[in-house]
Image (cartoon, coloured by chain):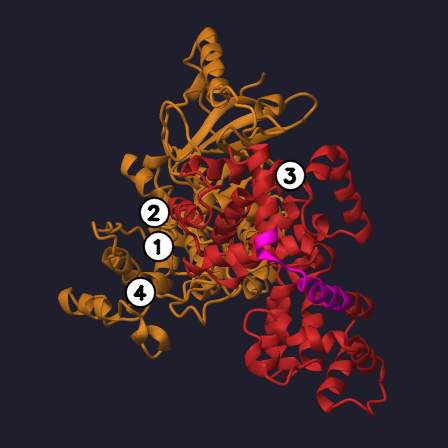
Chain colours: A red, B orange
């Protein structure tokens, strides 16, 4: 169903257990061990950060909305559960994912414009031939089994905004946490409403003192407070059902959670995933990602 | 291989000629398969490995539809919609898929309902998209047409009721899943040989849950003109599921009268691609429903084309402007002409039918009946159970879908009601295509 998550292809075909996802990736690695040892790549999350930054750069010059970027990120993730990254030209795949996502999210861009913008950003890796992108689009749609409708947590967030009387700061922070979750495997592991609730809890519990700092990503705002014993703070908040300790807002959230049938364990797992994302983020180097990818693409002639 | 064509279409062809043409039809699919270059995209599934193309059904701006039968153990009949590549020339190039193809593929993949056309699979092969659907033997346009031949004889009232019920059921499913169809018309309402209604052709359908762009931008015009809701004619930018309900009302009226109720002429877009006010179509509606009024349609005065509507009043004969709706008069004469009475063999849709029709053809989209409300209307709740087979108890068979062997036979363009206007979405990609057509 188009707008019913429970009957959606996302739930039926694109939701994996952690074990299954690890098996799939191991299978891809097994098939091409040589390339794996020849072309080491950074941690998947660091690569995701890099890809996300590239998508944002691409989108910025075309005034694209965040949701199209998010959809493109999900397409990338799904595509790379079926294809070994070392056999693709990641720049072409991400440009194609962006082009397709723009059409799906109703903000279409002309193929020539997308190609020329992408070429402006990565002249070494994108040829001026639009047919390349068109062909990659076929491959992408085929690998995604034409299942192109993506359910995002943003919608749950805006639906719950009033119910949970969230302030605009809290919504903005939760929004940026949702942006960040696309840098992890979470979109392949949990349904969007679980992600949205995680983002709300994080935003309410770890509200940083200077709201102005969290434009775009929650990393700078949240990393510190979540790491420094933040996990405990949250667990305490969630388990303290008597409500003597935490502020009323958190009490309200806790009782709402208790009444809803949301999988609390999954929510906590998501939070931990986010904490570890913010930890690994500190090692991020754009230059390093760029070099490793560039070397891989060039020596394997993947851009041809 | 059994051909199901009526004698009129294939009877004149000799056996050998049919054979040749059949081969050439298969070739239209095969020819696309050109030499592959290593490293390029190749489909894992091939159309010709799974299906035999047995005939040609129709063509449109999107491409062509073929009839096929499964092969290699695959059973059944199918309709294969082949999206034409953007440039048809010596060598086909990848030029990016049109947004409407993408929408239709994505939506059909997710949707599953007894009254919505069932997608079998999508094959992306050699720069073409093949969407494989279940085959449906009939459609409402063809059924309506059959009832005008050799002379007019009304579609039995219980059959109309059954068609409408299934149609609304399918539409309710679409609307509860936030899908607007946006091109409902008799030609797009498919009917299986066992009398099940399937809403088809989701090429203009869109999700309407908080779209990033307003539903208006990108698609300047939707819905074939005769079925276009008044708020669209008035230039509304925020249209809703109510546009589909208006089209359903027009289809209901057409099933009863066997003629489009508002058969206007479309004003063409000018060279600047601005959408003109559809004066003639609006007039056709006004002739039956009377002039829309601010009192009963509060949003009217803020519609972009409101001044145009007022100029319509000033410049025309005032005869039908100062009276109210004459829908009831239209309905009564429709019943009379069709021989719909409680004692006749056709039965009658009665006063409940009129009430439902008038609620569907309500000017104000906010007041217009929804699919859900319509299904609970006395027209359906009174008067016995409704079968899932609209042909139940109907004597005489409907002719089978015309399937020709001639691939170049582009007939749909001239058939009434199938003219597809409003393909202004994808204007980015389609500009070059339109010039050719």
SS for dot 2: loop
Contact? badges 2 and 4 (CB < 8 Å): no
- Residue stretch rendered in magenta on the structure: A270-288
The chain to which mark 3 is attached is: A
Between the residue at mark 2 and the residue at mark 4, the CA separation in whole angstroms equals 17 Å
Residue A86's mark? 3
Q: Is residue A198 magenta?
A: no
For label 4, the residue is B234
Residue drawn at the location 62% of the way across and 82% of the way down: A166
Q: Is residue B53 left or right of residue B308?
A: right
Viewer-side residue, A170 vs B256: A170
The image position of residue A164, as x and y in percent, is 66, 81
Q: Main secondary structure of the magenta part?
A: helix
Contact? badges 2 and 1 (CB < 8 Å): yes
The image position of residue B277, as x and y in percent, is 25, 59
Kindly indicate the quadrant of the structure image that contains residue B405.
Answer: top left
The image position of residue A195, as x and y in percent, is 69, 66
**Which numbered disc, 4 or 1, marks the residue that appears first in the sequence?**
1
Q: Is residue A137 left or right of residue B225?
A: right
For label 1, the residue is B221
Residue B421's mark? 2
């Amino acid at each position: 169903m188009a707008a019913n998550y429970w009957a959606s292809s996302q739930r039926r075909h694109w939701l994996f257990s952690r074990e299954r996802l690890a098996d799939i990736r191991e299978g891809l690695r097994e098939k091409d061990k040589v390339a794996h040892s020849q072309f080491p790549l950074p941690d998947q999350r660091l690569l995701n950060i890099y890809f996300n930054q590239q998508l944002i750069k691409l989108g910025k010059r075309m005034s694209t909305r965040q949701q199209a970027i998010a959809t493109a990120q999900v397409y990338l993730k799904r595509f790379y559960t079926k294809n070994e990254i070392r056999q693709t030209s990641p720049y072409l795949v991400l440009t194609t994912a962006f082009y397709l996502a723009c059409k799906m999210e109703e903000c279409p861009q002309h193929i020539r414009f997308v190609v020329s913008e992408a070429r402006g950003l990565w002249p070494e890796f994108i040829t001026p031939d639009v047919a390349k992108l068109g062909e990659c689009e076929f491959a992408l749609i085929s690998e995604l089994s034409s299942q192109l409708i993506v359910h995002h947590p943003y919608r749950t967030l805006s639906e719950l905004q009033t119910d949970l009387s969230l302030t605009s700061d809290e919504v903005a922070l939760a929004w940026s946490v949702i942006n960040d979750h696309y840098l992890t495997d979470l979109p392949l592991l949990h349904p969007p409403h679980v992600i949205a609730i995680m983002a709300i809890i994080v935003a309410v519990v770890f509200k940083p003192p200077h709201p102005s700092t969290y434009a775009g990503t929650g990393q700078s705002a949240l990393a510190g407070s979540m790491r420094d014993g933040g996990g405990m703070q949250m667990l305490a908040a969630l388990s303290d059902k008597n409500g003597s300790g935490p502020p009323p807002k958190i009490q309200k959230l806790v009782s709402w959670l208790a009444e809803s049938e949301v999988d609390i364990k999954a929510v906590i797992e998501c939070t931990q995933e986010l904490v570890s994302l913010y930890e690994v983020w500190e090692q991020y180097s754009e230059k390093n990602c760029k070099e490793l990818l560039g070397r891989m693409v060039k020596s394997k002639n993947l851009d041809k | 291989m059994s051909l199901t064509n009526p004698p009129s279409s294939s009877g004149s062809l000799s056996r050998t000629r049919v054979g040749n043409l059949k081969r050439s039809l298969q070739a239209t699919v095969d020819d696309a398969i050109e030499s592959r270059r290593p490293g390029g995209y190749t489909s894992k599934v091939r159309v010709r490995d799974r299906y035999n193309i047995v005939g040609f059904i129709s063509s449109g701006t999107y491409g062509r539809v073929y009839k096929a039968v499964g092969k290699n153990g695959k059973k059944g009949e199918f309709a294969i919609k082949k999206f034409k590549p953007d440039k048809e020339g010596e060598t086909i190039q990848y030029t990016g898929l049109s947004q409407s193809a993408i929408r239709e593929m994505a939506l059909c993949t997710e949707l599953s309902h007894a009254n919505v056309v069932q997608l079998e699979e999508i094959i992306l092969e050699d720069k073409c998209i093949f969407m494989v659907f279940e085959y449906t033997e009939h459609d409402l346009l063809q059924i309506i047409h059959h009832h005008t031949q050799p002379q007019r004889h009304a579609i039995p009232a219980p059959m109309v009721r059954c068609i409408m019920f299934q149609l609304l059921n399918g539409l309710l499913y679409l609307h509860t899943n936030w899908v607007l169809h946006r091109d409902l018309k008799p030609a797009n309402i498919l009917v299986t040989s066992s009398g099940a209604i399937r809403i088809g052709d989701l090429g203009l359908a869109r999700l309407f849950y908080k779209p990033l762009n307003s539903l208006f931008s990108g698609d300047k015009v939707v819905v074939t003109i005769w079925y276009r809701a008044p708020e669209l004619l008035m230039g509304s930018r925020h249209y809703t599921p109510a546009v589909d309900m208006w089209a359903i009302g027009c289809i209901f009226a057409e099933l009863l009268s066997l003629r489009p109720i508002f058969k206007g002429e479309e004003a063409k877009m000018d060279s600047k691609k601005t959408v003109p006010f559809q004066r003639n179509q609006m007039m056709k509606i006004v002739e039956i429903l009377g002039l829309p009024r601010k009192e009963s349609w509060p949003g009217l005065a803020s519609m972009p084309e409101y001044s145009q509507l007022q100029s319509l009043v000033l410049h025309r004969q005032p005869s039908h402007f100062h009276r109210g709706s004459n829908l009831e008069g239209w309905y009564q004469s429709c019943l009379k002409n069709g021989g719909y009475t409680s004692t006749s063999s056709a039965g009658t849709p009665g006063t409940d039918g009129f009430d439902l029709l008038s609620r569907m053809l309500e000017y104000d989209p906010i007041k217009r009946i929804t699919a859900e409300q319509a299904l609970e209307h006395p027209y359906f709740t009174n008067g016995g159970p409704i079968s899932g087979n609209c042909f139940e108890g109907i004597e005489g068979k409907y002719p089978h879908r015309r399937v020709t062997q001639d691939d170049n036979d582009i007939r749909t363009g001239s058939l009434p009601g199938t003219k597809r206007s409003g393909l202004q979405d994808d204007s980015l990609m389609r500009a070059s295509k339109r010039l050719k057509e």
